[in-house]
Amino acid sequence: MTVLDHCRIVGRVAAALLDNLPHRVLEALPPHLAALAACHDVGKVSPGFQKKYFQQWLLQTCPAVAQRPCHLFEDRHGIVSEATLRAWAKQHGHNGEWQRWAQVLGVHHGSREEPLAEPCAKYGGPDWLAQRIGLIGALTAELGPMPVAPPSSSDLHLAAGLTCVADWVGSNEDWFSADIPPTADELPQRVQSALASAGLMVPEVRRGLEFGDLFPGFEPNGLQCAVHDLAEEPGLFVVEAPMGMGKTEAALYAAYRLITEGHNQGLYFALPTRLTSNRVHERVGGFLQRAFGGTVAARLVHGQAWLMELPSGGGELLPGGAWFTPLKRALLAPFGVGTIDQALLAVLNVRHAFVRSFGLAGKVVVLDEVHSYDAYTGTLLELLIRRLLELRCSVIVLSATLTQKRRRKLICMPTDNDDAYPLVTVRKETGIRTAMTAPPASRRVSCSYAPPDERRLADLAAGMAEEGRHVLWITNTVARSQAAWRAARSAVRQGIPVGLLHSRFPSWRRDELETEWLTRLGRNGDRTGGSVLVATQIVEQSVDIDADSLIMDLAPTDMLLQRLGRLWRHERPGRAGAASCVIVGEALHEALSADQLRHLLGPSRWVYAPYVLWRSFRLWHDLYTVGIPDDIRPLLEATYAEPATDDPAWVPDLLDELNKKRRSLESLATGMTRGDLPTFDDDEEEAPTRWSDRAMVQVLLLRECDIVGRVADLVLADGNAVRVSAEARSVQAARAIHRNLVSLPRYPDFVTASGVLPCLSSCIHGTVVLLRIDEAGQLRRQDNTSVAYAYDDLAGIRRIPRAPETRQADDREDIYESDW
């Protein structure tokens, strides 16, 4: 295909993509971007590119160029395209600010370098430049002029995303074959067909549906009606309401109105973890089928989404399903549910960040559980919200435990009715509006504080389970969850189920456990008999678990309240006992110094800020009952207040330590969005959407391993046998491999050559450590030496206790979940 034909096709695709954008996005964009996008590949008309791909042709038609050394020429056509548009701009009297538009051409493959000034020998000299400028003239004659005004930063992001997406579609040979190039008359229809095949066409919404039509069997409560009523125009919505009050449905009901009234189109629902994404994906899928039709599905968007076996009729079976497989394209799907990380990559300095910006433009974006992020990710979240509003999105922020200070920071201006709860606050172009709704009937939960004695706590859990209660025991670290689970198994009588959930199970086993326990303890679970489920923080929010009794490690107040949201979540007749929780922790008031407090906190001090844990302890230690939701706002504000007058003298030092760390993380996050930093790969496993002081490594769990050169026969942890080869790519083998991976902190135990073994290179990206499970469950390296870890299907990967003299003072090794 000629460069002119390809550029013409991409320009027509860009024009069609623009026509599909919501009118609010189009109004914010300068006109004439289709011609700009069409010029993306004019740099292919250069000796460097031609020598790279068409050397034999050059020998026949231009031997003088063909015989010159390749290093004399630039073969990266994006750089040449940018330089050419700058030269064209000078010829047409456009100033230096206008020439920033040329960056769109230079970055359309994901990275950019500053080009040389034209005419330039490295790009071919004056004659080649004249050919390229003539090509721009032909494209503008057909597709219309270039933009008139200089671009803003937002303009550049959207134009770069438009160009990249149009190029991906226009380069697909299934839709635009060089063998049968479309004629000028055929091209418009061919473009529409390609966009439909790519899944980029937004389906028509069913109008006139009420809440009961979208969520059968339910009537809207006051909160859901208030959010819907305030959605008469787009804006930033902050919804604060207690756990279990239907915030998800409130957001979807508002999104339906914003879409039906033409303010937005498309939806992305962002959550903190993969587990919560998977569960909400099911709920959003039902909503979409009722709002748009039975064949419409939401794309599941996170690093392990491709491992999930989608049911018949799922997203992969729809037009364009396979086209969205690369995560950098996944946000282009009209509807998506996934981790917040995928959206945060739109503001980080990563390759193809602009594609994510384009994919989110004009959508309703729901950000759930925003209280759960630290200062680093929270800062990125604030920058994301600003970007989304620039992209003419409507942003709906959901939280049960948001502080007043945090709300004001998100809204970026003072707010009214600060003490109200539930509360909906909306920032629109016309100003701030708030709505207060009646809370659900308050229920009292009895509380007690107990020391971290696993044996006594296990006996307590066993006694409650034998009475027929379903007990949820939430710990702060993986190691504590495993210890609590072992104690509970020993304490309960035979026949009472005892389960364990944390992130150090391989994917296949974790899926089994999550399905078993979220089904048992869900809304419609079998409540016959009692049970005990021990878990880490992965179950504390956005998960429909309904426990009768709760045991939980001391944590910040907002996390304790979230955990209480798993207690008596649904109305059920005949529950055994009353709603109760036991908070587990040391007697922190006995600490005589900050160091002694840290010692009493143990590994929890690495998970949560010691100052916040101290403030939470002061509130909860002597709290005998808590009212939900009546006490949520007062407890939150008291926790994040300044030190009390009767606090020990060393407590303000803890606050100073917290503030210093917060400022450092905020500065680091802001720096990660600057364009002058190195560009990161746009992969959620590698791009810095979360802060951690400990690098992680992928571990592949095996039963047997036979590697011969570039081929390996493996028996994986789940018992499946696969053959992998560097020479043959197999989706089935890759899926099997990834379902047996676990992320662990990178310890000296895992010292290994960086990278991936050649036999696994077709299945795994990045560094991986192979560990074989021996007959006793010990994990061993390829040379058969052991590491300080063991594995079994019930407990997951566990750290083997070491002798005291070899134990490190740093006990952070057992806290890293890597669940997101």
Image (cartoon, rainbow, N blue to C red):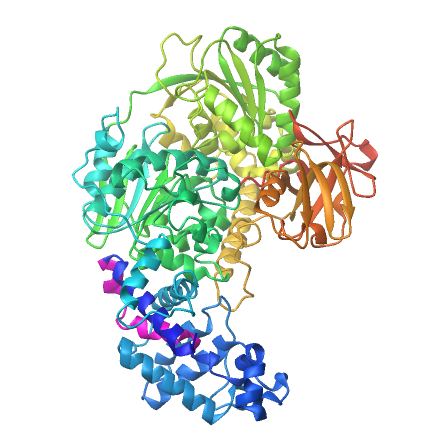
Q: Is residue 34 magenta?
A: yes
Residue 97 shows up from this direction? no
Q: Is residue 68 above or below residue 201?
A: below
- Residue appearing at x 56%, y 34% in the figure: 648
Q: Is residue 410 magenta?
A: no
Horizontally, is 489 left or right of 617 in the view?
right
Q: Is residue 35 above or below residue 429?
A: below
Residue furthest out toward the front: 180
- State which region is magenta: 23-41
Image coordinates for residue 351, horizontal then vertical, percent: 50, 62
Image coordinates for residue 103, horizontal then vertical, percent: 43, 74
Task: Choose between 497 and 818: the one closer to the eye.
Answer: 497
Horizontally, is 781 left or right of 29 in the view?
right
Image coordinates for residue 733, horizontal then vertical, percent: 62, 43
Q: Main secondary structure of the magenta part?
A: helix
Horizontally, is 371 left or right of 113 in the view?
left
Task: Choose between 283 and 751: the one closer to the eye.
Answer: 283
Image coordinates for residue 563, horizontal then vertical, percent: 46, 27
Task: Choose between 639 and 206: the one closer to the eye.
Answer: 206
